[in-house]
Amino acid sequence: MPADHRHDLQTEIAAAAARLIAEDGCDYATAKRKAAAEIVGESGARRALPDNSAVEHELRRYLQTFDGDEHERRLAALRRLALDLMQRLARFNPHLVGAVLNGTATAHSNIHLHLFTDSAKDVEIHLMNEGVEFGVEEGGGRGEPGSAVEDVQFLITSRHDALPRRVGVVLSVHDTDAIRVAPRYRSADPQLHPVEAAGRANATALSDLVRHTGRPG
């Protein structure tokens, strides 16, 4: 396949995947697979898959084009909700990661925090003392440096009209020393605010970002 044609095909697949993420709440892997199968068929899908950065670029374009001001209001509200949650979890050194940080959050997005602590059990006890109902899954890093020990999932209530009534939260609990491992999903997009591009942000950095992006309407 000529390089130019391959690039155009991957861009088309990335754009289709972005639509699936925005409209249906698909994760990146599922969205790319479905989009590729739809455009080139199952047999050629694997050879034509774009990388996640291409999908993220198209998702950002999609949200700016079709959601516009609503996307900005949603993003500001999610960041403020994340900041409030981080302040309540301050003893566990929380850092915001994922779509709420990098600006690609959709109506389906969870707030994803990385916690750095010597005891995952202390996180669970803290949530139980706050009356939070949660589920726990083993971390999916398979022993990779800086991988999560466990993922804690629950819902929190939102009173902002730009958000669903219940917003999902994922806490990925890491050992304290894992903070030394560089964030996996940093962005090189020059249009992003440095905090958005950093891959993870503590409460101080997120506060600066919230001031930069303005108050939700």
Image: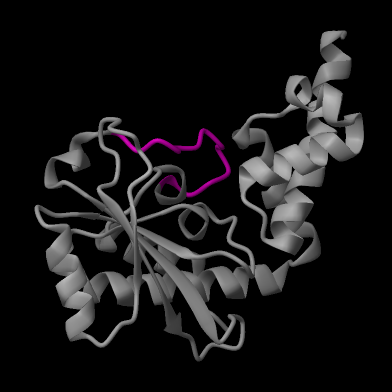
Q: Residue at x 50, y 65 (%)?
A: 110
Q: Residue at x 84, y 22 (%)?
A: 44
Q: Residue at x 13, y 47 (%)?
A: 176
Left or right, residue 119 beside residue 169: left
193 drawn magenta: yes
Residue 112 lies, in percent from the top left, at 41, 60
Left or right, residue 190 beside residue 98: right
Residue numbers of the magenta segment: 182-194
User: Where 164 falls versus 48 (above or below)?
Assistant: below
Tell me if residue 56 can be seen.
no
Q: Quarter of the image for the N terminus: give it.
A: top right
Along the viewing direction, whichever of 83 and 169 lies nearer the viewer:
169
Secondary structure, magenta segment, majority class:
loop
Q: Residue at x 55, y 56 (%)?
A: 103
Residue 96 lies, in percent from the top left, at 36, 57
8 drawn magenta: no
Task: Give the quadrant of residue 161.
Answer: bottom right
Along the viewing direction, whichever of 183 and 174 lies nearer the viewer:
174
Left or right, residue 73 beside residue 154: right
